[in-house]
């Protein structure tokens, strides 16, 4: 699945949950708290394929799933640039020290496995928007 298709599909899943919570008069703070890993795994099993296997995408105590991608991630499914004959498809806009460019054959992709930035509640509060797509608008270019 392309990055763009994943973003589109995920945005719809996110909207359904946020709309449901807003209809129940959840505050911004309650919505953010609802998206903590343990609660999402219990109540929104289809939101993430890792939930079914009791796995987290990042090894951290208080993982918040509100962003489930990072507003600093940049991608282009049609190639960003060619570096030493390899096609780059994604990168980190803030050059996080915990992320890295990984090479898979002739493709370069941003590897965010060790970066925890978007999964801290404090970061979610800082960039919060009810519309996940708005928060991620700069990702696809």
Image (tube, rainbow, N blue to C red):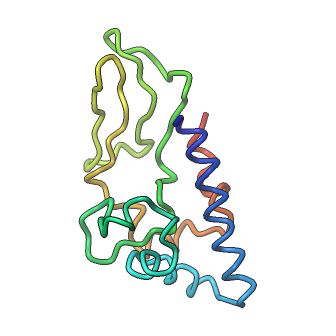
Residue found at the very far top of the displayed protein: 85
Name the side, left or right, on which 32 lies relative to 87: right
Question: 122 or 60: nearer the eye?
Answer: 60
Question: 134 or 26: nearer the eye?
Answer: 26
Residue under the point 32% across and 41% down = 111
Q: Position of residue 41 (x, y in %)?
A: 42, 75
Image quarter (top left, top right, bottom left or bottom right) of the C terminus: top right
Residue found at the very far right of the displayed protein: 23
Name the side, left or right, on which 12 lies relative to 94: right
Q: Position of residue 20 (x, y in %)?
A: 69, 79
The quarter holding residue 62 reads bottom left
Residue under the point 64% across and 88% down = 27
Question: 117 or 24: nearer the eye?
Answer: 24
Q: Position of residue 5 (x, y in %)?
A: 60, 40
Residue under the point 60% across and 44% down = 138
Q: Position of residue 55 (x, y in %)?
A: 29, 65
Residue found at the very far bottom of the displayed protein: 25
Name the side, left or right, on which 45 lies relative to 53: right
Residue found at the very far front of the displayed protein: 52
Relative height, residue 89 to residue 32 (above, below)? above
Question: 45 or 80: nearer the eye?
Answer: 45
Name the side, left or right, on which 21 lies relative to 60: right
Residue under the point 42% across and 72% down = 64
Q: How many marks?
A: 0
């Amino acid at each position: 699945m392309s990055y763009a298709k994943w973003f589109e599909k995920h945005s719809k899943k996110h909207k359904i949950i946020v709309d449901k919570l807003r209809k129940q008069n959840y505050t911004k703070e309650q919505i953010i708290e609802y998206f903590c890993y343990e609660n999402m795994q219990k109540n929104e099993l289809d939101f993430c394929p890792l939930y079914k296997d009791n796995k987290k995408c990042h090894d951290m105590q208080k993982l918040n799933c509100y962003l489930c991608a990072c507003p600093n991630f940049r991608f282009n499914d049609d190639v960003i640039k060619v570096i030493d004959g390899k096609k780059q498809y994604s990168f980190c806009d803030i050059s996080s020290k915990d992320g890295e460019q990984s090479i898979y054959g002739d493709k370069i992709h941003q590897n965010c496995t060790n970066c925890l930035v978007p999964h801290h509640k404090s970061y979610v509060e800082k960039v919060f928007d009810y519309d996940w797509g708005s928060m991620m608008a700069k990702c696809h270019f």
